[in-house]
Amino acid sequence: MSEPLAWNHLSRAHQKVLARVWAGGTIRNQDPSIVVGLQLMGYMQGDKLSTAGDQLCSEALITTMKRVAEAASTSGPKSN
């Protein structure tokens, strides 16, 4: 297994497959080379997410939610 990568360092294709499986989907009709790459990186075991893959997806969601909350707080209602 290679060194874990941050979500932003994965290709969009890798992110798409991880997000799909994390949301309960399958790897059916996905590029086998992407799936094998995720397995070699340690983010998937067979057709399921590994603990590292689940953690990566959770951290990506938390980071996204923090950014949304931050953007909402800095662009709050405008006063006239």
Image (cartoon, grey):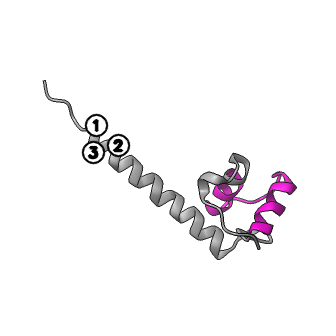
Q: Amino acid at mark 2?
A: Ala
Q: Are marks 1 and 2 in contact (CB under 8 Å)?
A: yes
Q: CA distance from mark 3 to mark 2?
A: 5 Å
Q: Which residues are magenta?
A: 16-41
Give the label on residue 71, or none. 2
Residue kind at label 3, given as amino acid type = Ser
| Residue 19 included in the magenta stretch of the image | yes
Dot 1 amino acid type: Ser
Within 10 Å of disc 1 (Cα), the crowding (few <14, some 14-19, many 20+) is few
Q: Residue furthest right?
A: 32
Q: Position of residue 79 (x, y in %)?
A: 14, 29
In screen coordinates, is 19 left or right of 69?
right
Magenta-drawn stretch, dominant element (helix, strand or loop): helix
Q: Position of residue 4 (x, y in %)?
A: 66, 67
- CB under 8 Å between callouts 3 and 1? yes
Name the residue tied to disc 3: 73
| Outermost residue, left side | 80
Q: CA distance from mark 1 to mark 2?
A: 6 Å
- What residue appears at the point 80 percent right and 61 percent down from the top-left corner? 37
Look at the image and tell me in which quarter the N terminus lies.
Answer: bottom right
Residue under numbered circle 1: 75
SS of the residue under disc 1: loop
Residue 47 is inside the magenta segment? no
Query: Residue at the location (63% across, 62% down)?
Result: 22
User: Would residue 61 appear left or right of 19 to someone viewing this image?
Assistant: left
**Mark 2 and mark 3 in contact (Cβ < 8 Å)?**
yes
